[in-house]
Image (cartoon, grey):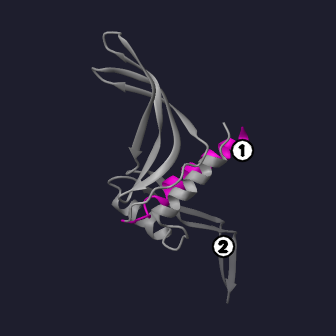
Amino acid sequence: MLERRKLIGLFMAVMMIVLPLAVTTTPALAQPGGGSLTTAILQVIPGVGTFTGTLTTTSFTLVNGVLNAVGTISGTFTNIAGNVTTIASQAVTIPLTSFTGTCTILALHTGAINLSVLGLNISLSPIDLVITATAAPGNLLGNLLCSVAHLLDSGGTLTTLVGLLNQILGAIRV
């Protein structure tokens, strides 16, 4: 159980950090990873009804430069009149176009500093300074700083990312 949580955490970290940086225009398809990731869904649509179900992601693909999650959705939809409709394993492809998250820009940790120069004494307490940027739609500076912070990371193309995400899915055992 703990190992699965670590893999899911890694999966989410990869998606939040690498996706804002990856750019490509070449269409490509990746082979399914062999595993899956199931996420519970509860969506209330005001004035319409409520959907309760699951989304099972089985693979990722890259089509025309857009990363897509591929899988199935199933559950029940209850309208405001109380009528229930069952949705049994409907295939879905979801474009992944907007991500949020934070990235560390600077982490500075120093111990106490004591200087004594020609009769002048300076004492500085330990410093813990952490600067993070939040990448999200509309966060211009956060998006820019997260992108710059990861410019030298390897595997920055979407094609490489699709392969990595499918490998992570393949490693998840349900």
Place of residue 104 in the rendered image (x, y in percent of width and height, measured from the top left):
53, 62
Q: Nearer the viewer, residue 87 or 157?
A: 87
Percent position of residue 162, x then y: 51, 56
Name the residue furthest top: 82
Asked whether the viewer can see residue 103, the reply is no
According to the picture, the residue beneath numbered tag 1 turns out to be 3
Q: Which residue is mark 2?
A: 123
Is 48 on the left or on the right of 56, as rendered? left
In the rendered view, tell whether residue 46 sits above or below residue 125. above
Q: Residue at x 35, y 10 (%)?
A: 83
Q: Element under label 2?
A: strand
Q: Is residue 64 left or right of residue 31?
A: left
Is residue 77 magenta-colored? no
Mark 2–mark 1 Cα distance, whole angstroms, equals 45 Å
- Judged by its main secondary structure, the magenta piece is helix
Q: Is 9 inside the magenta-drawn segment?
A: yes
At 57% from the left and 39% from the top, the residue drawn is 37
Quadrant location of residue 122?
bottom right
Callout 2 amino acid: Ser
Q: Which mark is residue 15?
A: none
Which part of the image, by quadrant, shows the C terminus? Answer: top right
Mark 1 belongs to which amino acid? Answer: Glu
Residue 19 sits above or below residue 89 on the image: below
Q: Nearer the viewer, residue 55 or 42?
A: 55
Residue 12: x %, y % from top left: 55, 49
Magenta stretch, residue numbers: 1-25
* Circle 2 or circle 1, nearest the eye: 1
Left or right placement of residue 57 versus residue 115 in this view: left
- Point 41% across, 49% down: residue: 96
Q: Is residue 57 left or right of residue 113?
A: left
